[in-house]
């Protein structure tokens, strides 16, 4: 594995961490400090963290800077996130209920599994780098 690829994976993980930090921080501020109910606060915080995650993955992790594909990329990113939500529920059931693994350990394992395939899906289908209109650059 090249240094460039390792650094890209580190940026992918850090971008996810920044998105998670955004989610938790905003949830705390909206719910505890401002007094918004937990469900609306969580929904707003999740939406903000989704946008932060998308922007960090697009511009920093994968270095994809074209503006003409942003809406398409955001939709594809959202579809993957939606699929990941379903996969999370299924895998959490398998690990925590079927196999009896503690729920927090299960979530940690499941998040790792989902992160691996998300990285490849984002890299191959969402954040492609274009050299020319019809020529893809690896």
Image: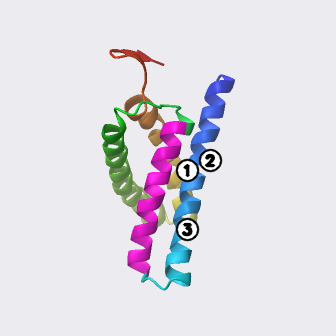
Say which label, 3 or 2, has the lower sequence index: 2
Q: In this view, does 69 lie to the left or right of 52?
A: left
Read off the residue under disc 1.
16
| Percent x, y of residue 95 | 47, 60
Gap in angstroms between the C-alphas marked 3 and 1: 12 Å
Residue drawn at 33 percent across, 50 percent down: 83
Residue 37 in percent (x, y) is at: 42, 83
Up-down relation of residue 114 to residue 22 (above or below): above
Q: Position of residue 52 (x, y in %)?
A: 49, 52
Residue linked to disc 3: 24
Which of disc 1 and disc 3 is earlier in sequence? 1
- Determine which quarter of the picture holds residue 38: bottom left
Label the magenta part by its dominant secondary structure.
Answer: helix
Q: Quadrant of residue 41?
A: bottom left
What's the residue at 55%, 50% (across, down)?
Answer: 16
Residue 54 is inside the magenta segment = yes
Q: Position of residue 101 (x, y in %)?
A: 53, 64
- The magenta-colored residue range is 38-59
Q: Is residue 33 above or below residue 114?
A: below
Residue depicted at x 45% and y 60%: 48
Q: Is mark 1 on a helix, strand or loop?
A: helix
Does 116 appear in magenta? no
The residue indicated by pointer 2 is 14
How busy is the neighbourhood of tag 1: few (under 14 within 10 Å), some, or many (20 plus)? many
Q: In the rendered structure, are the residues bearing label 3 and label 1 in contact, judged by CB atoms less than 8 Å apart?
A: no
């Amino acid at each position: 594995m090249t240094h460039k690829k390792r650094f890209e994976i580190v940026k992918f993980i850090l971008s996810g961490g920044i998105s998670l930090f955004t989610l938790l921080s905003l949830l705390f501020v909206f719910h505890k400090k401002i007094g918004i109910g937990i469900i609306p606060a969580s929904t707003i915080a999740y939406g903000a963290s989704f946008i932060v995650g998308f922007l960090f993955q697009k511009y920093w992790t994968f270095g994809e800077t074209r503006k003409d594909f942003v809406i398409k990329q955001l939709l594809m990113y959202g579809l993957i996130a939606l699929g990941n939500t379903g996969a999370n529920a299924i895998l959490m059931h398998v690990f925590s209920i079927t196999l009896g693994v503690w729920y927090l350990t299960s979530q940690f394992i499941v998040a790792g599994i989902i992160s691996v395939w998300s990285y490849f899906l984002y890299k191959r289908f969402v954040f492609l780098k274009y050299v020319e209109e019809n020529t893809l650059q690896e």
